[in-house]
Amino acid sequence: MPRSPRSRSSTGRRASRRTRPERAVQALTASNDTLTKAIEKWRIAGETSADAAAQEGFRPLVLAVPFGEQALNATRLESVGTLVAQFERAAISGTVRIENYAGSFCLESAGRDGYTLAPPASPAEQCEQIGNPFDDSQAGTARQPIAFANLASSVRRRTGGAIELELVAGSRDRLAVAYPPIEQATAGQWNAAAQANNRIEISIVER
């Protein structure tokens, strides 16, 4: 089966220069403790000078999205809800921005079941397709799950518009980890990078 021309062309892309090295390789698993620390950092930074805040830098909360899962499944949507609730308690207002980034995986056909990850030891350049069959943002926009739309509507009403949720498709050029040269990599090495890039980033744009 021929490779997807669109997804294949992305193999030579480098990590975006805007991506901070300190956040490039770690995907955090959501927990109340993690979210609490993120809120506290934002709150403290907001109380400092603008220059100090700029030097510190606001790093978004990064949630890994395992291959085969929707970006905003029930678990990650619950994490968003927990984060919003903590914003409310901290009296923080603004737009909670959720950016969906899709990794480009080395795949092989699974027949009627679609595609699955290629065997780790196989050459990456022999992948039947490079892409992500679970990517909802291929058209350049992030499709809103009904559950997310309901949560956004509920938060808007509950806070009187003080907090709003925004779901956007992250740029494919903004990588957390650069892909290895395809002609030198195994499928396992390629998919390790793809998994690191398969994520959502949650940040707050304060008013």
Image (spheres, rainbow, N blue to C red):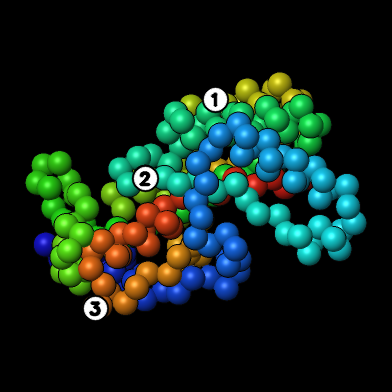
Q: How far is mark 3 from mark 1, CA to CA?
A: 45 Å
Q: Earlier in the sequence, mark 3 or mark 2?
A: 2
Question: Who is closer to the viewer here, 142 or 121?
Answer: 121
Q: Which residue bears the numbered disc 1?
A: 150
Please report contact status of discs 1 and 2: CB closer than 8 Å, yes or no: no
Q: Quadrant of residue 23?
A: bottom right
Percent across and percent down for residue 10 are 36, 70
Percent across and percent down for residue 38 are 68, 43
**What is the three-letter code of the residue carrying label 1?**
Asn
Q: How far is mark 1 from mark 2, CA to CA?
A: 24 Å
Residue visible at 46% across and 30% down in the picture: 75
**What is the three-letter code of the residue carrying label 3?**
Glu
Q: Earlier in the sequence, mark 3 or mark 1?
A: 1
Query: Is residue 181 visible to us here?
Result: yes
Q: Which residue bears the numbered disc 2?
A: 66
| Image quarter in which the C terminus is found | top right
Please report contact status of discs 3 and 1: CB closer than 8 Å, yes or no: no
Residue visible at 66% across and 31% down in the picture: 84
| Image quarter in which the N terminus is found | bottom left
Q: Which residue bears the numbered disc 3?
A: 183
Q: Is residue 171 above or below residue 126?
A: above
**Under tag 1, what secondary structure?**
helix
Q: How far is mark 3 from mark 2, CA to CA?
A: 25 Å
Percent across and percent down for residue 128 are 16, 62
Q: Which mark is residue 111?
A: none
Q: Earlier in the sequence, mark 1 or mark 2?
A: 2
Q: Quadrant of residue 130?
A: bottom left
Badge 2: residue crowd in 10 Å (few <14, some 14–19, many ≥20): some
